Image: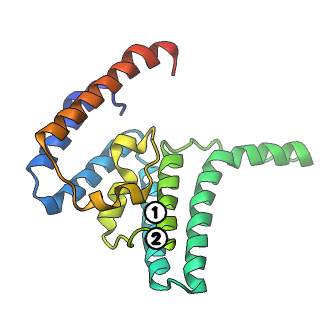
Amino acid sequence: MVFSSLEFLFRFLPAILLLYFIAPRRLKNPILLVGSLFFYAWGEPVFVVLMVLSSAINYFLALWIDKFRGSARSGYALAASVVVSLALLGFFKYADLLVDTVNSGFGSDFSPLDLPLPIGISFYTFQILSYTIDVYKDRVPVQRNPISLAMYIALFPQLIAGPIVRYRSVASAIDNRTHSLEMFSDGVHRFVIGLAKKVLIANNIGL
């Protein structure tokens, strides 16, 4: 699903906005999370599991970082977060390149894996690392609500094409957002301008 598609503009977006604004505060993050997972699964039904798994692993690693703050085990947990996250990203981006390199260098005949690159994996990987690094450096308190953390990682407006949002820049707003008609109008204005640039300019020059 892309932002300029009819499914997004006239079905998904109105539905998610309606549910979000009529829901009580405690349900807003769960609604955004479920909507974001549905949005991602529309194009990547298999790889949504990968994103959820990566989020879950790093949720527990961040708790470990916080629990053992100041000790070596906290650093080990951060190292595990970095290694696991980058290993998943590197596997999908460079596995076939590695196979080709080995075949060329050693005359072997390994078959390429032909793995599709999961949409948005670079963006959500670096957002995850932004979170665990911020927790390790004590810039933000650890997020103990897994739904709130997963919502930050999977939020559909930036999941597919970014930008990468640093956790510390939005941490206070994850569970304590404010809304107003003026803010909503400003958001609609930004969205319409961006959509027009995408449809009228970027699409026509092949971006």
Location of residue 77 (image quadrant): bottom right
> Which residue is tagged 1?
131
In the displayed structure, 67 sits above or below 25; it is below
Q: Quadrant of the N terminus?
A: top left
Location of residue 40 (image quadrant): top left
Residue at 31%, 48% in the rendered image: 36
Residue at 26%, 48% in the rendered image: 35
Residue at 40%, 22% in the rendered image: 198
Residue at 82%, 45% in the rendered image: 101
* Residue 86, percent from left and from top: 61, 58
Q: Please state which amino acid type lies under the numbered disc 2.
A: Val
Answer whether labels 1 and 2 touch (C-beta < 8 Å). Answer: yes
Q: Please say whether residue 197 is visible from this viewpoint.
A: yes
Q: How is the image coloured?
A: rainbow
Left or right of 170, for residue 100: right
* Residue 13, percent from left and from top: 22, 36
Badge 2 crowding class, 10 Å Cα cut-off, few under 14, some 14 to 19, many 20 or more, is many
Q: Please say whether residue 7 is visible from this viewpoint.
A: no
Q: Which mark is residue 135?
A: 2
Badge 1 crowding class, 10 Å Cα cut-off, few under 14, some 14 to 19, many 20 or more, is many
In the displayed structure, 161 sits above or below 27; it is above
Left or right of 150, for residue 47: right
Real-space Cα separation, disc 1 to disc 2, in angstroms: 6 Å
> Element type at marker 2?
helix
> Element type at marker 1?
helix
Q: Which mark is residue 150?
A: none
Q: Please state which amino acid type lies under the numbered disc 1.
A: Tyr
In the displayed structure, 192 sits above or below 27; it is above
Is 188 or 115 nearer to us in this picture?
A: 188
Residue extending farthest right = 106
